Each structure stands twice: as C-alpha cells, then as structure tokens.
Amino acid sequence: MFTPDFYLPDLDLYIELTTLKQSLVTEKNRKVRRLQELHPEINIKLLNKNDYLKLLAKYGYRAAGGAKVEGINRVLLSHTQIQRRVQALAEQISRDYAGRQLVLIGVLKGVICFMSDLMQHISLPLAIDFMAITSYGSGTESAVKITKDLDTDIANLHVLMVEDIVDTGMTLNYILGHLSSFKPATLRVCTLLDKRIRRLADVPLDYIGFEIPDEFVVGYGLDYHGEYRNLPFIGGLEPKLI
C-alpha cells in the first residue's frame, strides 16, 4: 500500500521522513526504493526532518510538520502561487506590448525579486531602469524624495512601472507624475500586490498580481527593517513585531 508521510500538492511531491537513527534510515530507504519500483511515475523523496522543514519554508508551507519561519504569522502566497501569477502577467504584457519598445522601471529595493522574475518571462526585447526614493510622514501628509532618478531617456518610449506593492497610492501617484514629465509614449503600472483597502490616491493599476488584505507583509523582496527580503514566499508579519 502506498503510504508516504506527506504530500506537497503544489510540487506534486511525496515525502518520506527519517531521522539520523541508522535503523530507521535503512528501513525508510527500503520503503522508498520499493515505492519507486511499484510506482516509477511518482515523485518521492526521502528527507531528514530538518531538510523537510527547510523545504516547507522554501515553498511557503507552514502548517504541515510544524514548519514556521520566525516572525511570520502566516503564509499568504506560496512560492508556486507567485511564480504562476508572475508568468501569467508576463504573458499578458508580452501580448499587449507586441511590436513596441518597452522599458520596465522599478523602485529599489523591494521590487527586485518581482521585476527579475517578470522580465525573464516577457518575450519581448526590453530595457530596464531603477529609481530610489525615500518617504516621510504617512497618509495624506507623506512626502517623497527621489534619491536616484532614471538613467534612461524614456521620451516617446512605452514605460511600464513595476511595483512590489501599492497601498495608499500616494508614493506611486508622485512617481507617475514625475515620469509623465519625461513624455513617454505610454505609461502603465504593473504591481504584484494591491492593498486596495488602504487606497488614498486614485492611481491606475493596469496589471495586478494579487489583492491582499490590510496586513503587513514580507518576503519575495518585501522587508521589515531590512529583513525577510530573501523569503521565497509572501507572509504576514507577526503583529507584535510591528
């Protein structure tokens, strides 16, 4: 009877767990080999428990096996969910901009993961550029200062502003006004996350990955005091840390 310890549906992967105890390793190895003989079409791995917990964290799982990344309250979007949506966005962008000269513009540093993955799936020649900004205050009283402007002349080019997350929209509204002054042929926005419930400025979003609730999220480029950017999934930060 085929009875592995765990199944990860997003990866179509069966997991058999073991410890460092030699007798258990030997027994588990026999089981995995037998399963592979009986079901060669099935993807199954024998993992030490610690390796399994790392695998869960990498792909955005939390409940199974008790895996948990310190400081993360819950996983909103797994690595697999993100990658599927990024590819779908890239395919739509490729269709919409066919035959045009496209420039992707991102704001450092949060957008790096999303923009890097997005551009790899866009099947068009394109250029990229980055801006850096600092924000002061909050809500309607916030102010934005550009600390790094574009290196590219975007006049008469088709510009796609790539954002990691849009919440109040105040910063994005300022950036779009700034970019418009360079007279691009078109100016559109692609955001991975849309926290629409916090919107204060009516900014146009042409491509949206996911709409999320009013929750502080980290991972996949998004940080909290410089941490969590390298998580391959997007999770909610423990409220007590904020």
Image (spheres, rainbow, N blue to C red):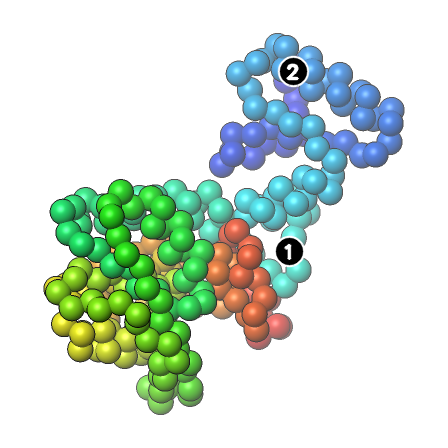
Count of marks, rendered view: 2
- Drawn side of residue 24 relative to residue 52, left or right: right
Tell me residue 242's x, y (percent). Answer: 57, 75
- The residue that label 2 is drawn on is 35
Q: Residue at x 33, y 44 (%)?
A: 121
**Badge 1 vs badge 2, beta-carbon distance below 8 Å:** no
User: Which element is circle 1 on?
Assistant: loop
- When the figure is inspected, residue 9 is found, relative to residue 195, above or below; the finding is above
The answer to which quarter of the image holds residue 188 is bottom left
Q: Name the residue under label 1.
A: 69
Tell me the residue at 64%/56% (across/down): 69
The image position of residue 225, as x and y in percent, is 57, 73
Visible residue check, residue 91 = no
- Please provide percent x and percent y for residue 215: 47, 67
Work out whether mark 1 precedes mark 2 in sequence or the reverse, and give the earlier one.
2
Residue in the picture at 66% in, 22% down: 3
Percent x, y for residue 4? 66, 25
Residue 110 falls left or right of residue 131: right
Looking at the rendered structure, the kind of residue marked 2 is Leu
Taking 223 as reference, is 143 left or right? left
Q: Left of 233 or right of it: where is 51?
A: right
The residue lying at 14 percent from left, 47 percent from top is: 99
Which image quarter is the N terminus in? top right
Q: Is residue 86 above or below residue 152?
A: above
Residue 114, located in which quarter of the rendered image? bottom left
Dot 2 falls on a residue whose secondary structure is helix
**Other-residue count near label 1 (Cα within 10 Å), few / some / many at <14 / 14–19 / ≥20:** some
Q: How crowded is mark 2: few (under 14 residues within 10 Å), some or many (20 or more)?
A: some
| Residue type of the residue flagged with mark 1 | Val
Q: How far apart are marks 1 and 2 (CA)?
A: 32 Å
Which of the pair 229/156 is nearer the observer? 156
